[in-house]
Image (tube, rainbow, N blue to C red):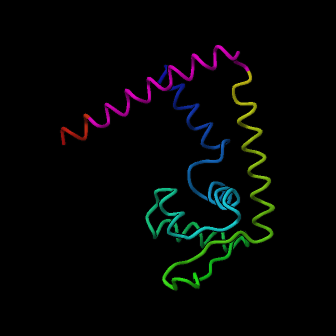
Amino acid sequence: HIVDTLGFCGHYIHVNGGGRSGRAPIICALYKRGGEMGQRDLMGMFELKAGSLSEILAKIEREGLIERTRDPQDRRQLIVRLTPEGHEQATAEQLDRERFRAEALCCLTDAECEQLEDMLARIKQHWLQLQQDKGDCQ
């Protein structure tokens, strides 16, 4: 039951907290870095393959939220920039994320939050060890 509940919480955080990749996280990342980044830097940040990121960026570009241009210093590189519409959307997304984070655990006391944080940190370490042990067996 606990693992099912953690699964629900993970999904809820992913959906309501902005996700891990896709439009919202990418425009928020750009917003936090002054509105532009190299495409290669975005690829590393989101741990995406070049083709996957390119596909996501093409969709965001079609929505008019970003533009991609060649880096004048290195023509092989692309610079991804928020458009004015993208900046507006990223501001709204960032406010939604901050609101979610502020409200997500307000049902717990400070002591309960500390206790939960400690338990989740231990679970995370255990799961990482399980993953490493599994990799060692392969």
Residue 102 in picture, x, y percent from top left:
75, 33
- Magenta-span inclusion, residue 111: yes
What residue sits 59% from the left and 58% below the top? Answer: 22
Q: Quadrant of residue 36?
A: bottom right
The part of the chain drawn in magenta is: 107-132
Q: Which quadrant of the rendered structure holds the C terminus?
A: top left
Residue occupying the point 62% across, 70% down: 59
Query: Residue at the left extreme?
Result: 137
Q: Work out whether 46 lies above or below 36.
A: above
Residue 8 sits in which quadrant?
top right
- Compare residues 8 and 13 and report the one nearer the observer: 13
Q: Identify the residue at horizontal 50%, vertical 25% (top origin).
A: 120
Q: Residue furthest front?
A: 73
Principal secondary structure, stretch drawn in magenta: helix
Q: In this image, 104 relative to 53: left or right?
A: right
Q: Nearer the viewer, residue 73 or 121?
A: 73
**Quick one: 115 or 21, which is closer to the camera?**
115
Which of the 4 quarters of the picture holds residue 38? bottom right
Q: Is residue 33 left or right of residue 122?
A: right
Q: Residue at x 51, y 57 (%)?
A: 45
Q: Position of residue 55 (x, y in %)?
A: 54, 70
Residue 79: % across, % down = 60, 75
Q: Is residue 25 above or below residue 71?
A: above
In the displayed structure, 45 sits above or below 95; it is below
Residue 91 percent location from the top left of the image: 78, 55
State yes or no: residue 93 in magenta. Answer: no
In this picture, is 130 found above or below 20? Answer: above
